Each structure stands twice: as structure tokens, then as C-alpha cells.
Image (cartoon, rainbow, N blue to C red):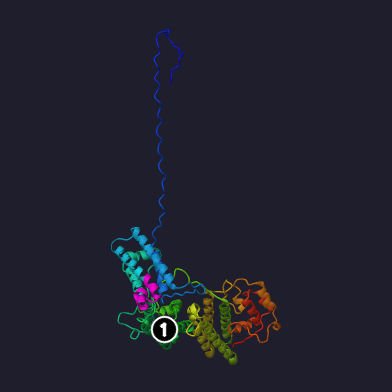
Amino acid sequence: MARSHHQHRHHHHIPDDPGAQTPPVTPDPPVTPDPPVAEDPPVTPDPPTTPAPAFADLGATFNDATRALVGGLWQNVVEEGGQGNGSVFRYINDLTAVQTGLQAEIAAGQFTGETLANVQVILSDIAIAITAATASVNGGGEFGSVAAAENALRTSHLDILNIVNNDANLQALATQDGGNGFMAVPATLPDGVTAADAPRTNLAEIGAIFNDAASRILGGVNDDNKQILIDDMNAVITGMRDLMQSQPMLFGGLTGIHADTVMRQAQLEIDYINQAGINPDAGRASNDNILDMIDIIQGDTNLANMASQGGVSGFSMFPDALNPTPRYQDNDAQTNFWANFIADGNTLGQRAIELVGSDDTDAIQALINDLQIFEKNASDFDLAQGGIFEARFDNELTPNSTLGAEVEAMIRGLTTENAALVAAAASVIHDNAADVAGNNIPITGGEFNPDGLTLVEVLSTATTALASASEEAASASEDDVPAAAAPALVPAAAPALAALADQPAESVAAAPIVPDMLGAKLAEAYHFHHWWG
């Protein structure tokens, strides 16, 4: 700082010397400001990391792939009824997810030593299975034939299950926290044992022969396994027939109907085995049929107990699917058919319960005729649909199915005046109707009412119909219908239509009716009574 020229002294005053010069004041050096402090660069957060999935969860996905493999993979160019284009895509997606998950677990250091080596083999098997899956529905691809592709597919898939179930570390991870990943499949018969010489003295031993077929058909039917599969199913048919005849006390009521259904579906399975390579939907049909047979046995306490005895377990379960099978989206004719099928079945069952033991021979014979027509018309409609519809519902709608077993039991109960058997058959008819009702979506959306006795009642839980359709049904009169016009409903519109025609117009108008097509058909049905062909 520069000094002031006028300074105050507190002691002696010294006069200024006029001759003396004031020395120049040296200015303070300029202050150099401190250099700016460099700020730390912004910290870029690490990208979020996705934790490796649990091994048990990957096992559940693999289980889904196993279930898709039953009966062989299939694909269609044209999608039908909301069912997708084929199980081959489900299978490949499942295995790709398992593949990606295992790679993430390896990167996370989850496996070491021999277990790591086993997981590397699993990844190799997955790569083979994915390639073989595509080849199995496309002429064999690089494997040279469909049979070779299907064999490679089954071998690699089963090798993965074998590795997991023989590695203590992997097995513990697969079942961690209550999981059931990489579940084993039904076993084949012991080496050197065939259906011809396998024991079949009880249901468990018969079920072991069934297991052999269920295991061998993983991946599909081909020249290498076709005859073995047919032999197995024939052994199941004859074994169950002999057992039911020799020990009828074990197969009364519902249990007998369920056993008869499985025996019939084994015959249906032979049809699918023979269609392999000819019918593109044979694999889809076989998948539904085999899994259904197992469900029937395991869902009946008596049969389930008989299927597991003496250290032998037959009709063994496959693992669960990740997601329920999509409901089939019906068209108008299919909606109409199911509505008739449900209403007619429930009405026939009710009539049978009322007539059994009544000695009204004419009425009983008329009901038996109606039951036979009901069965034939359902089978004819199913066959006419073909495609995925038939593949999914053969085992509900053909003589070699639940329908054939329940109708036969009801007729036998009527002719022998066995009220308990008739009641059991009526319950199976209702349960079959409830099954298909839950697996189909009416064209209007919503759902079918499986307890309905008329078309209106069956469709009462479908999406609310257009008011005009209800008004049309209520206001129509016989003069409005040309004499030559027949209702465009599925033949055998039967007791349901008879019941509908007997209702007052007010009750018809009050219930929701399918718009357009079905609204008009119900209006016609209001004027036509019992017309069984």
C-alpha cells in the first residue's frame, strides 16, 4: 500500500530537509492470484447390473420346455384360434432363456470345479437341442432326417436332466427354496424289457408300460420308435381291459368311467402315432392326449393309488407348465356348437337321472337314441373342424375319449337300472362340458356357463349381446320363419333347444344372446322343438 504524504508524529518533530529528496517508494509486487482449483470430473455411475437368475428358476423354465416336448414339436404357418404357430417356438425360447441364465451364473462365479464343467456340458447340450428342435419340424436339417433330429433332440434334453440330477450341487440348487427345477421325466422300461414281456398284473405295472411310451415320445414319433410306441399303447389297452374285466369291484362308478376313458384315449394315441409325418398337428394332439391321460389317473384317488404300488409307479407326472394353455378363440360356428354341446349334455344327464329305474321303456329308449346322436354329432363336428381345434378336443369329443366313455356308461346304467352309474355318468358329462367351457372363448368374448340347460343359459356369462339380438329373439313369431327354413344350428340341437322353445318369450329376451349370428339362430330355435336328426 502507498504511504500518505501527511504523517502525524507523536514525539519529536523533525523539520523537513528542503534539500533532501524522498527516496522512491518501491511498489509492492503485483499479487498473482492463486490458480483455480480443478474440479473433480463428474462420476459416471456404473450401469445397473442384472443379477444372475436363480438356478431353480431356470429349472422351472426347463420344465416348461420338457412339457412342450411331449408328443413331439409342431409348427403351423397359419395361426389358429389364438394358439400360436407352434410348440417349437416355445421350446426354443425356453432353452434360450436357460442358456442365457446359465451364462450369467458362470460370469458371476456361481460354479466351480466339476460342477462348472457339468454346466459347460449342459450349455453344449442346449445348443444341440435348439438346433435339433428346428430341424425336427423342418425335414431334419443338418441332421439328415427327421428321425435323426428327433433322436438328437431327445438325447440332449435327457442328458441335461441326467447331469443335473447326478450333480449334488446342481440338484441342491434346482430344489432350493422349495423349487422343483429340471424335474425328471417318466422312466422307460428296463433295458431288454419290452411291452410284450413286461408284467401287467396291476395298474402300476400297466402304468410303467405307459411311462415307457411317454418317455420315448419326447421329441416326436419317427421310424426308430414308432413300433415301440404302438406296442406300448396296445399293451396299455389290453392290460386295462383285462384288469377291469377281472376285477370289476375296483372300477365302479366314476373310477370305472375314468379308467375306460384312459383306455379309449390310448387307442386314440395310436391314431396320432400313425399320423406322425402326415398330419402337421399330430404332435399337438399327442401332447394334449398323453398329458390328459396322466391327469385323469392322478386326479382319481382310487386310480392314483392303484397306479403306485409294490414299488412301481405308473402314469408318472410330467413337470408343470409355466403358463396355462391359451384358451381357444372360437368362431361363430364353434361358439354355437359348444353352447349346444354344453346345454345338451347337461339336459341329457338330467333326463337320465329322472328316467333310470322308471320302467318307462319308450322314454328310456328315446333317451338312449338321443345320447347316441349326441355323441355322433359331437364327433362329426370335431372331425369337420380339423387342425388345432381337433387336435385339442379329440379327447373330449370322439368315441375314443371322455365322451365315448360317459355315453357308454350312461346307456349301461339305464339298461341295467343302475342309478349310481347313471349319476356318475351325468357328473362326467357335466365335468367334460365344464372342461371345454373353460378352454374356449365364445366369439363374443367372456365365457360359457357350464351349468346351463339351454343356449341362453350357457351364453348368459358371455359378453352382453346387442339389444337388437335380444329383441329379435323375443319378438319373432312362427309367421316370421319360412316353412322351409331349418335352424342353421349344429345338428342335434336337441334337449337344449326343446327346453329353450318351451320357455316364455320374456325369458329368452331377458338373457344375453350372442350378437348377429347367434341372436338370429336363437330366434329361430325358439320356434323349433325336439329335432334329433
Q: Quadrant of residue 161?
A: bottom left
As drawn, which residue projects farthest toward the bottom?
361
Query: SS for tag 1?
Result: helix
Instruction: Name the residue: 44% across, 85% down.
Output: 249
Dominant secondary structure, magenta:
helix
* Residue 107 position in % (x across, y down): 34, 58
Q: Quadrant of residue 64?
A: bottom left
Report whether 139 appears left or right of 355. Answer: left
* Residue 326 position in % (x across, y down): 50, 71
Q: Quadrant of residue 2?
A: top left
Residue underneath mark 1: 274
Q: Which residues are magenta?
A: 130-150
Residue 367 seen in this snapshot: yes
* Residue 205 position in % (x across, y down): 37, 82
Q: Report the front residue among 328 and 314.
A: 328
Q: Report the front residue among 74 and 452.
A: 74
* Residue 207 position in % (x across, y down): 39, 80
